Amino acid sequence: MLEEKLKTLPDSPGVYIMKDAAGKIIYVGKAIILKNRVRQYFHSNKNHGAKVKAMVAKIADFETIVTASEVEALILECNLIKKYRPRYNICLKDDKSYPYLKLTLAEKFPRVFVTRRLEKDGSKYFGPYTNSFAVKETLELLRKLFPLRTCKNIPARPCLEFQIGRCLAPCVNKISAENYSYLVQAVEKFLEGHTAAVEKDLETKMAAAAESLNFELAAKFRDVLLSVKKISEKQKIVTDAGNLDAVGLARLNSEVCAQIFFVRDGKVTGRESFLLNGAADESDEKAVAEFLKQYYSSTKIAAEEILLPVNLADEDLKILAEWLNVKISEPKRGVKLSLVEMANENAQKFLEEKNARADLKNAQTIGAVVELQEYLNLPKLPRRMECFDISHFQGAETVASMVVFENGAPDKKSYRRFKIRSTEGKPDDFLSMREVTGRRYGKAESLPDLIVIDGGIGQLNSALEIIRGLGLTVPVVGLAKQFELIFVEGKSDPVELPRGSQSLYLMQRIRDEAHRFAITYHRKLRRKRNLKSELDNISGIGEKRRADLFKKFGTIQKIKSATLDELLTVPSMNRAAAESLKKFFAAQD
């Protein structure tokens, strides 16, 4: 599932939410390009620190929220972290320790910096932020856009920050107090999310400076304006929108999705997606009205206003508003419209990802089966495939596995494993293959559409000798380990499936699964044999005590390292047997 989701990630900024097997949110992060950032967690493990490796090991699912820009993603990330306090994010217990951005309005030439202390000193604080990296990132962005002074004490001459364009040096009158004050106000508006107002004011200041022939100052305002426009957004993650529920609607093929964004105290704190069954042939207005009825009938409404993507009929609107005791509207402009558009966009993304995952799964399963029939020229669609593999160690504990794939997907309840009797002590894969196929198809009530033998032409011929001898006409192929060449009955040249084809991936999966199942069984038998052979040489340790020891400790090494008291906790052990066991292992050492 994770691999399928990774293939459908968007090339957009946004927030990603990692969850464990219980569905609990364990990490929230932001990205400029979601596809690149999220894939890094799963595809570059060697560069990760211990904390990230531990987190990735627990990830069972993830979801993403698309935003209009990185700044919007940053703000949303902070809101979600504050709400869910994920285990692998930076989450401090005491609100007083959260980092804030402090704008020192009481100073002659105000600064902006990170602080964890709130003081009544005339400054303005923005936050709190629960992600210290995010707040540092915001500060770095602000200093690029608005080069306010960074020094604590006003120097007598311009410092290095001025030389590299990171400060306007108000301390030596390189910029007037009035224009510097304007930049401070721009920082304040920017942090509050009013980027449109900042852009408008910058344009006014730039024009005024050019008109007064102060082209150097005009150029500085122009550079700031271009930077703001480049990274700014129509602020949807806002600080003045109150408590809202913004509903979005999207359609794809015959599916309809409603998505609801929760805005609390002006901040988006979460979202939910719902598939509406039976809404494909209904109008958007009816779909939204039915969604509102069903959703709010089972949940307590906490919003002061519900924003809709469509204009409901006056009658429906009146009844719903009276029932819910809340204002319901279809916004036409501004921040509220942006929230609805974001809900619509994410609802559409939800359907596209769901559809892409379904298409990918179909291509990997039944689509691959159809491909395989074509490439191998099979008489019927190989809906049921059975694959055999042999495993042994120098002829000892020879086993065989049979795995089953139905419509391109594993059917684990039909798996079988065989302990080979005919080749014990003398490795012979061909004889082993004849034995296992004879045992499987000698009295078979149901037959597969295709039999796959893990191996080359020799293993294939060994299996065919038995299968055809039983009068069966089921197609049988051999899958060579090298280059995944497929040997077909009656053909001297093997079939090579196209590189990158889903049929090739299917054959690789079924071969790997047969190998895994066989070697797992072989290792289990070998462990039991090793344990049995050592304990059989100890006086007082019979079959019952041997089984109890293995059940208690699991491995021979743990039995060796167990203390006398620990051995006596085994139900069937007595002191004489425990002491005998300890003496035996001591003599070995």
Image: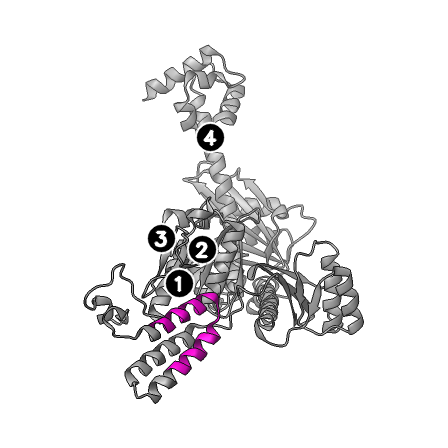
Measured in 3D between alpha carbons, the distance from the residue under mark 2 to the one under mark 3, in whole angstroms, is 30 Å
Q: Report the mark closest to the observer, 1 or 3.
A: 1
Q: Are marks 2 and 1 in contact (CB under 8 Å)?
A: yes
The residue labelled by disc 1 is 138
Mark 4 Cα within 10 Å, few/some/many (few <14, many 20+)?
few
Main SS, magenta region, reads: helix
Q: CA distance from mark 3 to mark 4?
A: 37 Å
The residue where tag 3 is placed is: 46
Q: CA distance from mark 2 to mark 4?
A: 59 Å
User: Between marks 1 and 3, how big is the CA–CA gap?
Assistant: 29 Å
Q: Is residue 516 visible?
A: yes
In the rendered image, the residue lying farthest to the top is 576
The nearer-to-camera label among 2 and 4 is 2
Dot 2 or dot 4: first in sequence order is 2
Q: Position of residue 404 (x, y in %)?
A: 60, 52
Is 208 displayed left or right of 15 in the figure? left
Q: Nearer the viewer, mark 1 or mark 4?
A: 1
| Image vertical order of residue 267 relative to residue 388, above or below | below
